[in-house]
Image (cartoon, rainbow, N blue to C red):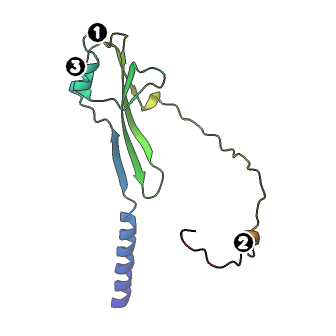
Amino acid sequence: MKKALMIAALAGSVSLAGLGGCAKTVNQRGYLFDEEVVEEIRAGIDNRSSVTAALGTPSMTATFDEETWYYVSQTKESIAFFRPKTTDQFILVVTFNDRGDVSDISQLGLEDTNEISFVEDTTPTRGKELGFFEQIFSNIGRFSSDGPVQPGY
């Protein structure tokens, strides 16, 4: 009876230890927003230097237009070895005019994102495809018998 109880206790502790590795991990990535600071930025009043002083450098700028700055914050959750899932996202978009003054401020959330599907095709390469044994034995006989190579020659 004691042996069965010990085995049950050992099995229970092993399963609890295994479940401990399945705990949810939450990661906050990117810019950490302070709502009060974000609300103080005004279009027509602030400029690049005041935005940089208040928010710091942007997470990224627009690809073809350096007049648009993005401050990005994401919260991702993952369980064990599974791919992380974005659960929350906040993007502050600050647009400047030609003089460097703030012309527009907008906010984007997770609902404003679009999922991008990547092409799964592969590009074929030219050349001979070697089989398993060809890969293993293909170099036999390809070496010269002149002796070892001397360093520096």
Residue 30 is at least partly visible in this image = yes
Number of marks in the rendered image: 3
State whether residue 1 appears in this view.
no
Tell me the element at label 1.
Answer: loop
Residue at image x 57%, y 74%?
Answer: 150
User: Residue 151, percent across and down?
Assistant: 54, 71
Identity of the amino acid at label 3?
Glu
Q: Position of residue 91 (x, y in %)?
A: 37, 29
Which mark is first along the chain, 1 or 2? 1
Q: Which residue is mark 2?
A: 139
Residue located beneath label 3 in the image: 40
**Amino acid type, callout 2:** Asn
**Is 98 in front, or is 88?**
98
Q: Which residue does the image show at 43% across and 58% down from the upper left? A: 80
- Where, quadrant-wise, is the C terminus in this rendering? bottom right
Q: Secondary structure at mark 3?
A: helix
Give how far across and how far down residue 55 sits, in percent: 26, 28
Question: How far apart, in angstroms, are the residues tagged by discs 3 and 2?
Answer: 70 Å
Of residue 3 and residue 136, the one placed in the foreground of this image is 136
